[in-house]
Image (cartoon, helix red, strand yellow):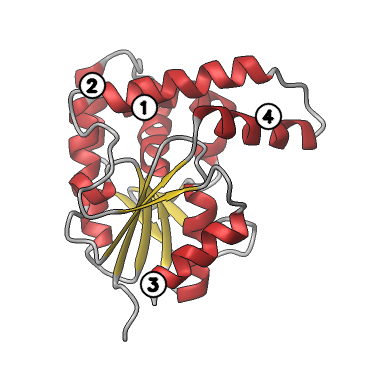
Amino acid sequence: MPHPYIIAIDGPAASGKSTLGRRLAECLGYLFFDTGVMYRAVTWVTLQRGVAVTNEPAVTQLAETVQIDIRPPSIEDGRACDVLADGIDITWEIRTPEVERNVSPVSVYRGVRQALASQQRRIGMRGKVVMVGRDIGTVVLPEADLKIYLDASAEERARRRYTEVIKRGEKADYEEILAGVRMRDEIDSTRAFSPLRAAADAVILDSDKLNADEVFAKAEDLCR
């Protein structure tokens, strides 16, 4: 039986979507596409052009006019994919602290989400893709062959992030991280346009008691 042509993975922040998506894509030889990079790309363009991220109409216009593309990695420098904005490689530029600080407000604008959903769909319909986000199975690619909703409690997700920061030798406050996770969940699940939720036909994987290898094994079985 052939593998699914289009795979959608949704779920809340820090649930392990990107880790799972990247491993599945490598296993299948597919493009790994974390849609969060598109919001980072728009944020980067917004900052580069001196547009205030609080100016929703102007940011939306940029999202509607800038051509963003996601391609398999062309350079072996640790990147999961190439991120292009109007043909310019901005793969690492979108990872700067300045973009990190400003991407959240950009990502909740209705017009931005609509514009990027269209671009995400264009890329996803090429097929042989594992697309990760929060509204892939419900809005962007409702016809995906396999939909996975990867979930975990806020406490477990905060614990994982806390552990990651500590392992890097940096200081972290668990309660502060937990509050941030809960705030992001509130924003994602209550926004008026394309709120975070599992598609009716998605397979829900709860990773609270599963490690990354166990989650991958279950997802790999689903692909078969």
Amino acid at the residue labelled 3: Cys
The quadrant of the rendering that contains the C terminus is: bottom left
The mark found on residue 223 in the picture is 3
Question: Residue 115: percent from the left, percent from the top?
Answer: 19, 39
Give the labeled residue for mark 2: 58
Give the labeled residue for mark 1: 46
Mark 3 and mark 2: Cα distance apart in space: 41 Å
The quadrant of the rendering that contains the N terminus is: bottom left
Circle 1: element type: helix
Mark 4 and mark 2: Cα distance apart in space: 36 Å
Of circles 3 and 1, the one toward us is 3
* Residue at 56% from the left image edge and 34% from the top image edge: 157
Circles 4 and 3: CB distance less than 8 Å?
no
Question: Residue 151: percent from the left, percent from the top?
Answer: 43, 42
Q: Is residue 208 left or right of residue 135?
A: right
Between 206 and 75, the one nearer to me in the picture: 206
* Residue at 24% from the left image edge and 18% from the top image edge: 56
Mark 3 and mark 1: Cα distance apart in space: 38 Å
Q: Earlier in the sequence, mark 1 or mark 4?
A: 1
Amino acid at the residue labelled 2: Ala
The furthest residue to the right: 169
Mark 1 and mark 2: Cα distance apart in space: 9 Å
Q: Is residue 223 visible?
A: yes
Amino acid at the residue labelled 4: Tyr
